Amino acid sequence: MESKAVTSCSLPVMEHFYTLQGEGYNQGKACYFIRLAGCNVGCLWCDVKESWSAENFQKISIETIYETIAQTGAKYIVITGGEPSLYNLTEWTDFLHKKECTIFLETAGTNSIQGHFDWICLSPKKFKAPHTENFNKIHELKVIIAHPSDFKWAEKFLPMVSPQVKLYLQPEWSKASKLQPLIIDYIKSNPHWTLSLQIHKYLQIP
């Protein structure tokens, strides 16, 4: 699926809400999440499968969403999905930067990332490989561990990223109790990695 050029600044949005970032480098920050609909990855363990079909959701302009953002006072914006790299997000990011927002992107990077972001977290998936040029743009690499074989798979990405990129291993939520001990032991032997946990799920917040 090719990246979709957008000139009207309207995109299919599954949901948008104010909460805490629950995982990765920016964990614990108050962030306004915008979850775009549409996905070309289709992870078996995805917890928002309803976001996969863009046709099921209304297209909303960033100006309309910002009316709600402004009421919260949020300055950190997370654009996630679905798979946000399906869309050209330049107009959205330019608009939000004019409002003095800091913009985080969470993506599997299956298409070339388009937009101006302050922090990009790439979470590659086995189901569809990331676009290679995205590795030069990211600040954070977060690999989901769903099986012990995923440790070796995670290591293959290290030559593709700069030494400044933050490296995280995160257990797949439905298997977390079994995988967390393995990840901890692995990180102790491979300390270039850091543990990421989905604290929003432990806290039962969105």
Image (cartoon, helix red, strand yellow):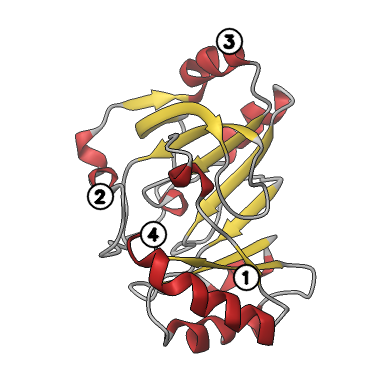
Q: Position of residue 77 (x, y in %)?
A: 60, 34
Q: Of the residues tagged 1 and 4, which is closer to the observer? A: 4
Q: Earlier in the sequence, mark 3 or mark 2?
A: 2
Residue at numbered disc 3: 71
Indicate which disc residue 173 carries: 4
Q: Earlier in the sequence, mark 3 or mark 1?
A: 3
Q: Of the residues tagged 4 and 2, which is closer to the observer? A: 4
The Cα atoms of the two marked residues, 1 and 4, are separated by 25 Å
Task: Please state the total of marks drawn on the protein image.
Answer: 4
Q: Earlier in the sequence, mark 4 or mark 2?
A: 2
Three-letter code for the amino acid on which mark 1 is drawn: Phe
Three-letter code for the amino acid on which mark 3 is drawn: Gln
Indicate which disc residue 135 carries: 1
Q: In this rendered view, identify the residue nearer to me: 150 or 105.
A: 150
Indicate which disc residue 49 carries: 2
Three-letter code for the amino acid on which mark 4 is drawn: Trp
The Cα atoms of the two marked residues, 4 and 3, are separated by 32 Å
Three-letter code for the amino acid on which mark 2 is drawn: Lys
